[in-house]
Image (spheres, grey):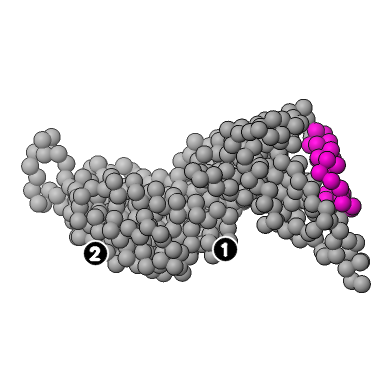
Amino acid sequence: MNVVLDQAYPSRIAAIESLTGYSQYAGGAELRARAEEVVAAAELFGKAETATNWRAFAIALEILGLLADWSEAVHTAAVDADRFVRAARLRYRSFKSDVAQTGYSLTVVAALAPIDADLEVETVPAVRAAIAGLEMPVGIFSIEDRNNFGARSVGAVAAGAEEITVAFLEFEIDGRAAETFHSLSAGQVHDLDLTIRVSRWPDDAERLVIGPVSIEPASTWDFPTFEFARPDGPPPYVFQRQGRMALHAAQGFNARPLEFRYAAEFKPRPKHEESIVVAGQRTLRLDGTDTLRHPLTGYGELDAKIIRLRDRLRLEPMISETDLRDLLALLIPVGNLMGQAVQDKRYPQPINEAAFQADFQSFLRANSAIGSELEVQGHVAGGRVDLTFRGIRIELKSERYKRLLPDDCKQFAEQAASYAVGSGRRVALLCVLDSSVKSQAPFPVADGLTIVPVDTGTSPVYVVSCLFQGGLPRPSDLSR
């Protein structure tokens, strides 16, 4: 039993350190990684009640990870920060209704109870501390079904424990800890560093092989396989090794992140059936979008902002892949037009909404990816929307008298959201031209691209807002 405890408890200790070691509004990704390790440790206890306790602890870590994301979003003024606390609340309610009635599990439910009330960001550290401070009973593991194998002695149980090996993995890419979703440039060679902690070594195994497994096309990637020879001395054993990795092809802009999982195997295969549990960072999720070689808008900062927006909207389960793909198809030329508005002073004088629509419509129509699929003046929800592309509604506004900043576009978002709801969509595009005469320098173009969540009372509709800057002064005029 000591072997099982020796391998299970490091994951709990690491999780508690993550709970108590971070500042009050950071650590969401770290807590989710720790939760994966705790789930792997729970497998060591088989069907015993202790396994239920460990799984309850893992769920608590996942919920606290969402709260950490919420706190960070609030402190950094991210859009729709409350989506994280809503998700945490739903996860807690599901956990509360399904949790097994063990003493530890019930104390976890009680410690997380503030989530289901009027939770404030300032309360999150106290909830984290409450979970970290809960005492977990020392566990035992279960043995096989005695109906099949007969009664087993205490010695046999100990032997069964010796047949379990745990390998904890940690990866670094180019000297930086691998993230939940890690951006990786295609066509380049990168360093992949592995740190592994192995609980024990079978007597008849000569080496341990850690290798990648993926459903991605084999011709598009090259990841290292790590081999470790039998070590000297008593367990546990810690190894470090560096390899090289590469993606041979850039990832399509609309494609999901590439996913790779590392598996472990002893060779030659031990004569006795022995389980090896891989825990820690066993999965690498990589985004190989390369906007340097394959630019989207022609403006690097806008390309990066669109990719962040794409990743943000992918987290919303109510937004379909089709709608997101069509919205992104619009954003690429619209982003280019936003860049032109500043770089070439495309709108030097105040113009009304009709003139803006005529120019905007002509520009999109000339794009081969849009062309004839751009519809004009459709009737939706009792009103007339300006433009539509594959069901994605586009609302246009023009301001001729006062300067607008990105937050000022929120006043137009509900109209765009109404058109989206009337079309059975969860997303819409709002394009606002500020052509008022200005005496200030323009703000960075990418700052004009934002997401405005519109609360409908049940679930949000997401309006992507694009603020075009017109009426700009000559740079030399600003120094007079």
335 or 271: nearer the eye? 335
Q: Look at label 1 and name its amino acid.
A: Thr
Asked whether, in this view, residue 31 is left or right of residue 298, the answer is left
Q: Residue at x 45, y 64 (%)?
A: 121
Labelled disc at residue 76: 1
Q: Is residue 161 above or below residue 237?
A: above
Given the image, on which type of amino acid does mark 2 rest? Glu
Q: x, y (%) of residue 41?
A: 30, 53
Q: Does the magenta stretch include residue 90?
A: no
Residue 351 lies in the magenta stretch:
yes
Left or right: where 113 falls relative to 82: left
Q: Classify mark 1: residues with Cα within 10 Å, few (<14), some (14-19) or many (20+).
A: few
Q: Which of marks 1 and 2 is nearer the N terminus?
A: 1
x, y percent for residue 383:
69, 34
Residue 68, percent from left and from top: 45, 60
The residue that appears at 55% across and 47% down in the rendered structure is 455
Task: Please give the name of the residue rendered at 51% of the width and 45% of the height, measured from the top-left corner.
Answer: 457
Residues in magenta? 339-366
Quadrant in the rendering for residue 426: top right
- Dots 1 and 2: beta carbons under 8 Å? no
User: Residue 271's quadrant in the figure?
Assistant: top left
Mark 2: secondary structure: loop
* Magenta region, main secondary structure: helix
**Looking at the rendering, in which quadrant would you find the C terminus?**
bottom right
Decide if residue 83 is in sight here: yes
- The structure residue drawn at horizontal position 35% and vertical position 60%, both measured from the top left corner, is 114
Q: Residue furthest front?
A: 382
Q: Residue 135, which numbered label?
A: 2
Can you tell which of label 1 and label 2 is closer to the viewer? Answer: 1
